[in-house]
Image (tube, rainbow, N blue to C red):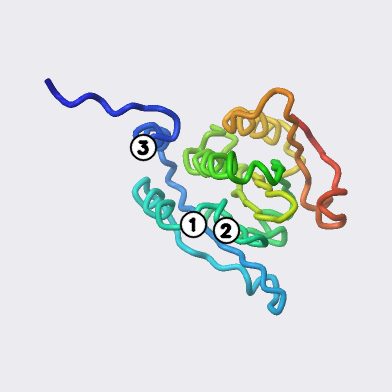
C-alpha cells in the first residue's frame, strides 16, 4: 500500500497549494509600514520583497510575522508591482476599497485567516476578468480594531466593484448578516475613515 493522500482541509498545505495552481503572471510586491511619528509617512513605508511564483509566495509568507503578531500602528500591503500602497498613486487615486473592520477580539481568532485568504484572492486572480481592476490589499493593525481592505482602481466601475465585493465576501466566509462597505478614496481622503460614507455595500 502506498502512503495515504494528504488531507486537503482548508488551510492545510495541499489545499492552499491547490488554490494557487493557476498563479497569475503578475508580479506582486509586499510592503511594510511601521508608524514612527518622528518621520514622514512615506519614510515609514518599506517594500519587503516581490513574488511572482507559488514558491516565492510561500517562502515569503513563512518568513514574515503573522499579522496578529505585529505591533499596533503597523500595516502590511500586497500590491501589483509598480503600484504603491497609497491613495496618491496614479493607479489608485480614482479607486476605492472594500473594507472589513474587525473587533479587538477577532485578532487572535480570525485575523490571520482572513488576511491569508485576501492574499490568495489577489495572487490567484479570484475575480476572473475583473481581476484587472484590483490594485492590492492592506491590513491595518490598530488598538481599537484591525482592518483589512481590498483596493480597486476605478470607484465608478460599478459592475466590477460589486463583482469583486461579492466574491471577496464569499471567499472570506463572512455571514450573510455581515455587511461590508466600499469607500471611494476621494471620500476617505477628505473625511476621517469613520465618517467616509459607503458608495456600495454587499
Residue 79 placement (x, y as % from top left):
56, 53
Which residue is found at the position 69% from the left and 71% from the top?
Answer: 41
Above/below status of 35 relative to 91: below
How far apart marks 1 and 3 lie (CA) works out to 18 Å
Badge 2 or badge 3: first in the primary sequence: 3
How far apart marks 1 and 2 lie (CA) works out to 7 Å
Badge 3 element:
helix
- For disc 2, the marked residue is 70
The crowd level at tag 3 (other Cα within 10 Å; few <14, some 14-19, many 20+) is some
Residue 201 placement (x, y as % from top left):
77, 32
Badge 1 element:
loop
Q: Residue furthest bottom?
A: 38
Q: Nearer the viewer, residue 40 or 89?
A: 40
Locate residue 11 relative to residue 176 in the image: left or right: left
Q: Nearer the viewer, residue 200 or 132?
A: 200
| The N terminus: image quadrant | top left
Badge 2 element:
loop
Badge 1 or badge 2: first in the primary sequence: 1
The crowd level at tag 1 (other Cα within 10 Å; few <14, some 14-19, many 20+) is few
Badge 1 or badge 3: first in the primary sequence: 3
Above/below status of 154 relative to 42: above
How far apart marks 2 and 3 lie (CA) works out to 23 Å
Q: Residue furthest left?
A: 1
Q: Are marks 1 and 3 in contact (CB under 8 Å)?
A: no
Q: Is residue 43 visible?
A: yes
- For disc 1, the marked residue is 65
Q: Is residue 99 visible?
A: no
Residue 88 placement (x, y as % from top left):
72, 62
Which residue is found at the position 41% from the left and 55% from the top?
Answer: 60
- For disc 3, the marked residue is 13
Which residue is found at the position 66% from the left and 46% from the top?
Answer: 149
Amino acid at each position: 500500500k502506498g502512503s495515504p493522500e494528504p488531507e486537503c482541509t482548508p488551510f492545510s498545505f495541499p489545499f492552499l497549494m491547490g488554490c494557487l495552481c493557476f498563479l497569475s503572471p503578475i508580479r506582486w510586491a509586499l510592503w511594510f509600514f511601521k508608524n514612527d511619528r518622528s518621520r514622514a509617512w512615506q519614510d515609514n513605508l518599506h517594500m519587503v520583497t516581490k513574488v511572482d511564483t507559488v514558491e516565492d509566495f510561500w517562502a515569503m509568507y513563512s518568513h514574515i510575522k503573522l499579522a496578529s503578531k505585529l505591533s499596533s500602528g503597523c500595516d502590511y500591503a500586497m500590491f501589483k508591482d509598480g503600484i504603491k500602497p497609497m491613495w496618491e498613486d496614479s493607479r489608485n487615486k480614482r479607486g476605492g476599497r472594500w473594507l472589513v473592520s474587525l473587533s479587538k477580539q477577532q485578532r487572535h481568532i480570525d485575523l490571520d485567516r482572513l488576511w491569508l485568504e485576501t492574499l490568495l484572492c489577489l495572487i490567484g486572480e479570484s475575480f476572473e476578468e475583473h481581476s484587472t481592476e484590483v490594485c492590492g490589499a492592506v491590513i491595518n493593525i490598530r488598538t481599537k480594531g484591525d482592518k483589512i481592505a481590498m483596493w480597486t482602481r476605478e470607484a465608478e466601475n460599478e459592475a466590477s466593484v460589486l463583482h469583486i465585493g461579492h466574491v471577496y465576501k464569499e471567499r472570506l466566509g463572512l455571514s450573510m448578516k455581515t455587511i461590508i462597505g466600499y469607500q471611494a478614496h476621494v471620500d476617505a481622503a477628505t473625511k476621517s475613515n469613520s465618517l467616509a460614507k459607503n458608495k456600495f455595500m454587499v
